[in-house]
Image (spheres, helix red, strand yellow):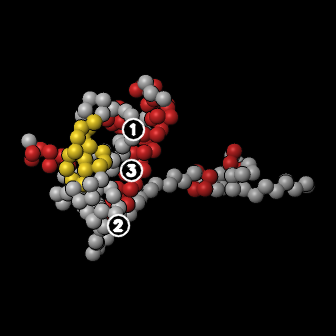
Amino acid sequence: MECDITHRAEPNFCPNEQCKDYGLRGHGNIGIRAKYGKYKNRDLLYCRTCGKRFAASRTSALFGLHLPAETIRQIIHHAAEGVSVRATARLLGLDKDTVNRVILRAGEHCARVLSGLLTSLQLAETQLDELWTFVKKRNVLVNPKKSRSSTDKPGYGRPSTPPRAC
């Protein structure tokens, strides 16, 4: 059982910026202090170095949200599939502001994680793939000598000068 407790606390780090073990994962300084929550299913962790207590979910996108993890997962899944905020709220029986708050929080968390990962890369070489796009040419531009069409009106690339009197 002791191994299980250490394993669950291992991915966390001390959030106290004044602690000498701040930000260090798997350093052995984090332990489980107690259980909390409505069903006593959440871990309250502590740092053995500085004694600060904190929630295990403090550094996650879920911290402070009063929704079940499964509901949050469904919201993020709907957003990734391109479902609108209002439709997600209707499907899950939630308020649209709640759905929006979860999506924004998850996006901010992803941005923080990626910025930390991308700045610590030590690359010797970088390869950028080309982005190929297809631009459809309109017939008016391909065959400009054809008869006048609806694109000869002002606003379609033609000068808007009045016709000359004969």
Mark sitting on residue 119: 2
User: Is residue 38 shown above or below 102?
Assistant: above
The reply, left or right, for residue 113 in relation to residue 8 is right
Amino acid carrying mark 2 in the image? Thr
* The C terminus: image quadrant: bottom right
Mark sitting on residue 65: 1
Q: Label 3: few (<14), some or many (≥20) within 10 Å?
A: some
Q: Position of residue 159 (x, y in %)?
A: 76, 58
User: Is residue 147 shown above or below 118?
Assistant: above
- Report which residue position mark 3 lands on: 109
Q: CA distance from mark 2 to mark 1?
A: 29 Å
Residue 133 in view (yes/no): yes
* Residue appearing at x 24%, y 37% in the figure: 35
Identify the element where label 3 is drawn: helix
Q: Nearer the viewer, residue 47 or 87?
A: 47
Closer to the eye: label 1 or 3: 1
Identify the element where label 1 is drawn: loop
Residue 85 in view (yes/no): no
* Residue appearing at x 43%, y 24% in the figure: 93
User: Is residue 118 shown above or below 63?
Assistant: below
Q: Nearer the viewer, residue 18 or 138?
A: 18
Q: Are marks 2 and 1 in contact (CB under 8 Å)?
A: no
Closer to the eye: label 2 or 1: 1
Mark sitting on residue 51: none
The reply, left or right, for residue 108 in relation to residue 42 is right
Q: Are marks 2 and 3 in contact (CB under 8 Å)?
A: no
Label 2 or label 1, whichever comes before in sequence order:
1
Label 2 or label 3, whichever comes before in sequence order:
3
Q: CA distance from mark 2 to mark 3?
A: 16 Å
Amino acid carrying mark 1 in the image? Leu
Kindly indicate the quadrant of the structure image that contains residue 42.
Answer: top left
* The N terminus: image quadrant: top left
